[in-house]
Image (cartoon, grey):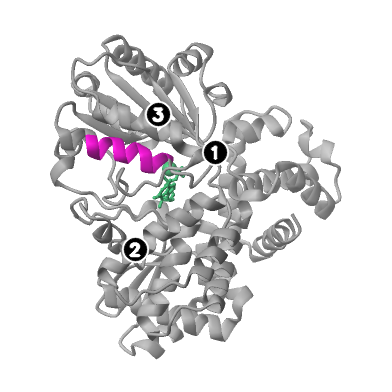
Amino acid sequence: MTKTDQERWLRVKDRLRAELGEDVFSSWFASMDIEACEAGAIRQSVPTRFLKSWVQSHYAERLLACWQAEDKDVIRIEITVRSAVLKTTTTKPAKGDGEAFNGAAIRTNGGDGRGAPLGDAGAHDALGGSPLDPRLTFDNFVVGRSNTLAHAAARQVATAKRGDPVMFNPLYIHAGVGLGKTHLLQAITWTGNGIGERKVLYLTAEKFMYGFVSALRSQTALAFKEALRGIGVLVIDDLQFLQGKSTQAEFCHTLNALIDAGRQVVIASDRPPSDLESLDDRVRSRLAGGLVVEVGSLGEELRLEILKARVSAARVHHPGFDVPPQVLNYIAKAVTHNGRDLEGALNQLLAQNKLTGHPITLEMAERAVRDLVRPMEPKRVKIEDIQRVVARQYNVSRSDLLSSRRTANVVRPRQVAMYLAKTLTLRSLPEIGRRFGGRDHTTVLHAVRKIENLVGNDMALAEEIEILKRQLQDNP
Ligand code: ADP
Ligand code: MG
C-alpha cells in the first residue's frame, strides 16, 4: 500500500465526515484504517467485530460511494478486524529522529502497525521475536519526572555487558496504556542487539504463548526452551495477557531458569505483580523480587516535551511543518495521560498540513483532538457503571447481575454487561469475572463471544448495545 492510498483514504474520510456529520463519523469511522488496495478492491480494518458488522450493515454503500467519488475504479470494499491482520513491512531502525517519525507520519491512531525491522534486530528475528518498531529507541524517548527511574533502569539493562553482575532481576515496569512501556522495552532490544554483547529477545505475552503452544504441538518444546536459554535478555511485553495454566507454568519455568542462570529478564505490564491475579503466588513473588518500577502519567510538561521532539523530528522530512507554540500548548493541555494520542494528534495535523498546504491553526488542532479523544473515552468507563446502566436498561437489579441465577431475563443482561466490560474497559477476563460475583474467566470469555456472535446477526441487539455504549461513554 502506498502513501497515495493513505492520502486517498484521508480524503474519503473527509467526505464521510462531511456527509455523515462529526458524531456519526467519529463513532464508526475514526478507528478505521486502510490495509491494502489493489485492482478496484480496498481492504480496510477496524478494531472490533462489532464495528465491522455495524459498518457493513449500515454504511457499506455509503463507504463505497465515497471511495468511488474519489476513484471510480473502486468496486469492492472488504472490512477486516484488525487484530487478525499482520503487517510485515521491512524497515531499518532510523538513526536520526526524522526518519523515525516519517514512518508513522500518516498512521492513524488505533492499529498497531509496527514494522519488522532487519539489521540490528537480526538476533532477535532469528529467535522468532515479535516485530519491533524502528521509532522506539532511547534517542526518541523523552525523560521526565514520571519515567526517570524506569528509563535509567532500562538503559542500565540495555548497556550491561555479558558477565556484568545482574543488578536487578527481573526488571518489572508497569504503567497504564500509552505511557511508554513498549517504547522502553523495544529501546532495550534495539540497543542491546546493536551493541551485540548479549542477544535480546522481545516477545509479547501473546507471542510467548503462541510460540510455546505451537512448539508443543510440533513437539519441539525442547528446542524452544533451548532457544530461550540461548538468549542474554528476555523481554516480555504486556504480561497481563498471559493466559492459560500450562502457559503460565511454562512461563514460570522459563523465568526461573533464566534468572537462575544469571540472564536478565525484563517485563512490562499494565499492573504491578501483586495484581496479576491469574498467576500463582510463587511467580508473583519472583516477579516482585527484582526491581519493580511504575511509570507515572505523563505530566503536561513532559507531554509538551514529547510533542516538541516529535515536531522537530517531523520537520527533518517536512520542513514546512510549522506548529505554533500555542497549538502545542493546547495539545499538551487537552490530550491528557496518553502518549499514543499525542502522536495521533500530531499525525493528523501533519497529514492535513501536507494535503491542504494550510498552515496549522488552533481550530485544526481542536478538531484533531476532538476526533481522537472521543474514541478513547471508553477507557474511563467503570465496571460498576456498566452494571448499573445495564441493570436499569433491562429492569433487573445489580445484585441479579452478580448472582448465580440463570433465568433468561438475567442471563442475557449479565452477558451484555460482561461484554461491555470487556470492550469498554481495560480489565482482564479474570478481573471481570471477579467483579461479576466471582465468576471464572472462561465464563466471561463465553459471554463475550456469545454477544459478539449475536450482534453480528441481531440488529436489534446490536442497536441496544450501541445505546448502552453511548450512555456509558457520554455521561461517565
Ligand atoms: P505502552 O506500551 O505503555 O502502552 P507505548 O510505549 O506504546 O505505551 O507508548 C505510546 C506512544 O507514546 C508511543 O508512540 C511512544 O513512543 C510514546 N511515548 C510514551 N512515552 C514517551 C516518552 N517518554 N518519550 C517519547 N515518546 C513517548
Ligand atoms: Mg505497550
- What label does residue 296 carry, if any? 1
| Image coordinates for residue 338, horizontal then vertical, percent | 52, 51
Is 415 placed left or right of 329 in the picture? right
Which one is in front, 54 or 35? 35
Residue type at mark 2 is Ser
Tell me the distance, in whole angstroms, between the alpha carbons under discs 1 and 3: 17 Å
The answer to if 186 sits in the magenta stretch is yes
| Image coordinates for residue 316, horizontal then vertical, percent | 26, 66
What residue lies at 51% left-to-right and 81% top-to-bottom?
A: 16
367 in relation to 297, above or below: below
Q: Is mark 1 within 8 Å of ligand 1?
A: no
Q: What is the span of residues highlighted in magenta in the rendered image?
A: 181-191
Q: Based on the displayed image, in which of its 4 quarters is residue 171 positioned?
A: top left
| Image coordinates for residue 228, horizontal then vertical, percent | 24, 23
- What label does residue 204 carry, if any? none
Q: Based on the displayed image, in which of its 4 quarters is residue 186 positioned?
A: top left
Q: Which residue is mark 3?
A: 267
Q: Which residue is mark 2?
A: 312
Residue type at mark 3 is Ile
